Image (tube, rainbow, N blue to C red):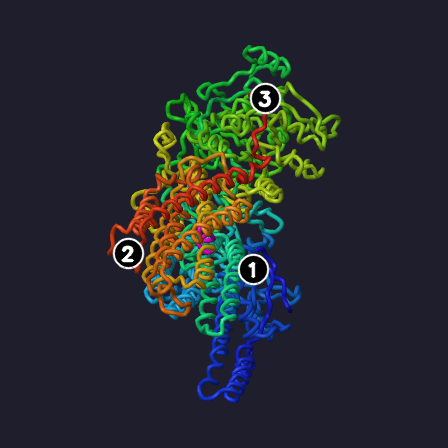
Amino acid sequence: MASFPVRGKRLRTCTPLVRRSAASRLDVWPMGLLYAVALSWGLSSFQGLTGLLLLAPCAALHVLLLLFSVWFVEFRALVHFREEREVSAASHCLVLPERYQGRVSLVELHTLRALSERGNASARPAHYFEFRKQRFVFDPSEAAFAKLHYPSSLDVQLYRKDKGITSETQVAALEEWYGTNQFDMPAPSFLEMLQEQMMAPFFVFQVFCVLLWCMDDYLSYSLMTLFMLVLFECTVVKQRERNYQELRRVPPSGRHVYVYRGGKWAMSSPARLLPGDLFSMLDGEQVVPADAVLVSGKCIVNEAILTGESTPQWREALPADAAGKLSSKSIHKQNMIYKGTCLVQQEGAGTVAVPKPPHGGCIGYVVRTGFATKQGKLMRTILSSSERVTANSFETAMFILFLLVFAVVASGYVLHHGLANPDRSRYKLFLHCTMIITSVIPPELPMELSIAVNSSLVNLIKLGIFCTEPFRIPFGGKVTICCFDKTGTLSSDELRLQGVSGIELIEGHGPPANSEIAEKEEARGKKATIKLVPPSLLPELPVQILAGCQSLVASNGTVVGDPMEKAALQGVGWYMAQSNLVCRGDDASESQSIRILHRHHFASALKRMSVVGQITTTKAGGGTQTEVRVLAKGAPETIERHLRTVPDGYTTLHNRYSRQGARVIALATKRLTLESTASSKHIPRADIERDLEFAGFAVFACPLKWDSEPALRMLRDSSHHLVMITGDHALTACHVAHRVHITERRVLLLDNHEIDGKPDWRWSSVDRKVSMGFAKGSASALAGDYDLCVSGDGLTMLMSCGALREFLPFVQVYARTSPEQKQHIINALRDAGQTTLMVGDGTNDVGALKQAHIGVALMSGGSTQARGRRSNKGGTGKRLRRDNGMSKSERPREQDALELPTVKLGDASMAAAFTARQSSVMPVTHILRQGRTTLVTTLMMFKILGLNCLTSAYALSVQYLDGVKLGDTQATVTGLLSAIIFLCLSRTESRKELSQERPYPSIFSVYLFLSVLCQSAVHLIFLISATTLAKEAMPDQDRLDIDADFQPNLVNTVSYTVSSVVLMTTFFVNYIGRPFNQSLLENKPYTSVLAVGSFLAWLLLSDVFYDLNELLELVPLPAGMGGRLVGFALVDLVATWLIEKALGCIFPPPSVSSMAKPRVSSKQTAE
């Protein structure tokens, strides 16, 4: 095929096509030729209308071709289109997406005028297609399609120098190229969606089966089945319609904004914004209308609707000396604002190529609009999640093929015997053979597979957990390894400043301590020379750094921002007068304030932050002293590289507190001489942060969340391997990991002990009592006695020497990792064959969350239980509260499992497929429980469907040849009872605990196939024995001819009653309760229906109610036969139950992965 590659992660290839003319379509001229041949041969060979009957098979084939064109996109492309090598001559494209990125689609190919470098329309045509609200444009130079290019990665200086869109001609060209800045989501009508649902293969197949049953005089059963199918499809369509209505209620992009076009500022609708526009929002809280990079000024935005983090973020304009390409995900992350986020405050400043807007606000350059924005990406994900979901379609198809083998054998058996009898009606024979084959797929199969997943979705929403990719739910039952971020995920964000250590190391505050002496004294239990100074006794320099080096925001009298910075400000007794001004409390003998002139914000890659602050001290007598200082803080090992002189004992001191689980931040400062306050913005960051002076270690208490330990203990006890992946210090991470059961033995850290500038990687214990050299091939030996911790630098070394795959299964803690390294760890675990779960709460975890099979984003600020409720003590102003919990007004209406739940903006995070609206890690256990329940319920359904299929194949073949038939009423009652039991089965609730035993990850297991075959053999023996007994007791005159209409007789009565008993036995024996689901007795609806069904079967066997037997077209049983059949039924029940339990013991679920097995060693020693 003449396919073109598609650059990007979502699509694989695109094949240009041209529509065939009506006469040349492959479902027109071949069929016309076939009709002509059939008609000619029929009329010449047969008399009258008999010859016309040959047209019926041709018509059936034609209808099948038309349906195939609807069901299979590739088939429609083959029949209705022809390939075209030139994109310019094509009218459509066949698009092949990557896995889980959508279905193969046939899309229309459009042509418009390409854009010139200046943004105007050129004479050169451009060809594009749209897939899932994204536009892909053909690039002739690369001979490939690529996503529509947006100005999101230009040279940063181009943004600062740009003067916006200059003419209406340019506006028209850009509007044609990019479209409007809004979410255009046309909703199909109810009838259109219903037609789409009813053209689905399963539905058409079931309608075909209904017609077959009607032709065999099963009218009531056929109408009941058809009603059930149509009702289910109408329910699904109604819910889809409701979902579309919810999604179309997206909040507007905000009020009008100022846009700079044609050399002047003017008010414009946000919907008319285009990439390349310069815009400025009005003051007050407003929704950001597009993804943009700030070119002037700074602002504070709340990105909760995208990331779930309620903490407002500072965003600043691109620095005047910035160079290189714009990198919105890393280097220039601090300069980006995104559509849908909320503008809290803004300040206009700086000089750019255009005049200031009339209201003096900050200026943004639009880089993405509409569905190309981050909010648009989230909208596309939610839209795609509204499609019908089922269990694994591949496994379903393979299981049906397995059952089809038995159905074909049974059908062939009937066909062979039927053709051997010349008196048999060939019409009835072929009709019955077709019914045997179609019985492989029962009418309730598509409904049950959908409900199995929908039920879990509904249960998760009730728990405040939202899922945008429902196909991932079954992965929850297969998870082998659970990875956690630490700060904000396992540990609380309610930090407390304990004090500052290392004051003695600051010049002028006492003699430096000898690190070796301090360490020895500490080991002997003596107090170390260096003490932790409480906040109330701190000297000026540490206080100024803690108060001034922050990114806090003062909004409406409330201080919001990073919890650690709020704790520091509160701890030293300062308050925020403005967002850039902090002051010391009024009770001080002299007033002091710090005006922040310029911020270099914290970056995960840099692990540090600095500000240039103007410190003003007003003496009690009225004198004023002003100085400008660099106030810096960061990870101790990072700040160490920026110090002019590293004090003796530096590393030992911060390791001491990290070992205790505290969060340790290094403080540093230096005096700065400026020509003017504005000049601080033009000094490169590298110069600002060079030759700093050490000012102590700020020590913060970082308590665990109240439910972290019980949640992770539950995961450990349920055969999951636990791993921590954090950016925190290794010693702090190891302390927390031990408290939450991630590590339970002595931990070895992989450190680089440089010798003469050469790396010397060694494994060292936390207390430094154990030390051994690193060597490839030693992973298994080390893991037998120790738990392992690897830092980000150690991870880089393992990757460079090719040892990562060897050590990967045995590392419990990854510390000081960057966001990219977190993502790489998850990818490596997936490549190693593990089913991964990742839990995080911040934007630093987005990459890892998206790569994991199950990514869970915790919405910070969510509701907590009574023990974990937060308090707001101190003088930092009112606490910003954003309850992400399920408030009364936000609770979803009660939904049935037949309905696909709605996920709305604000519920879901762009970070992960699962979003928990609470900061607790306990939702992880809920997701895993629902995943296991979905797997187990699907397994039960397939087993029961398989057993029913095999027994029905016998009844429709061997028993049919003996004249045994079902009455219409009998088939209707059995079908209705089976559907009700299946519905109760699909609504089975999971247990509250996670068991150590794991479910079978797939229906393709020796256990399942042997169980189905062995139980079927027992049931068949029961059926054969019962019908043989009935044949012996039935008079010859009551026997029915194969082609005769149904008449009640003894064999039919026994066969139907025994089949009903077998049905009840199948549902009873194959129910899987503990340890995954409710036990049989706990599942009240399921047990009640089984009890009623079993009681009815007993009534039929005992002939107690003659009217009931007459209603079901049954005849009375001879004396003593009912008792013998009850005995057979008990033997059948006991035998199948023993087989099921024995096979479960002989072929247990796959054992726990080696990564999750508890390792026991004689050297186990807790830290």
Front one among 19 and 610? 19
Question: Around disc 2, counting alpha carbons within 10 Å, would you say few (fewer than 14), some (14 to 19), or many (20 or more)?
Answer: some
Q: Residue at x 56, y 29 (%)?
A: 1158
Return the residue at label 2: 1109
Q: Are marks 1 and 3 in contact (CB under 8 Å)?
A: no
Spatial separation of the CA atoms under disc 2 and disc 1: 57 Å
Residue 583: quarter of image? top left
The percent coordinates of residue 306 (x first, y second) are: 45, 48
Three-letter residue code for mark 1: Pro
Identify the image quadrant of the N terminus.
bottom right
Spatial separation of the CA atoms under disc 1 and disc 3: 50 Å
Residue 59 visible to the viewer: yes
Labels 2, 1: front one: 2
Front one among 931 and 347? 931
Q: Where residue 1164 is drawn, which disc sits there?
A: 3
The percent coordinates of residue 531 (x first, y second) are: 53, 16
- Chain part drawn in magenta: 944-949
Spatial separation of the CA atoms under disc 3 and disc 2: 70 Å
Return the residue at label 1: 97
Three-letter residue code for mark 3: Gln
Overall secondary structure of the magenta section: helix
First along the sequence among labels 2 and 1: 1
Residue 215: quarter of image? bottom left
First along the sequence among labels 3 and 2: 2
First along the sequence among labels 1 and 3: 1
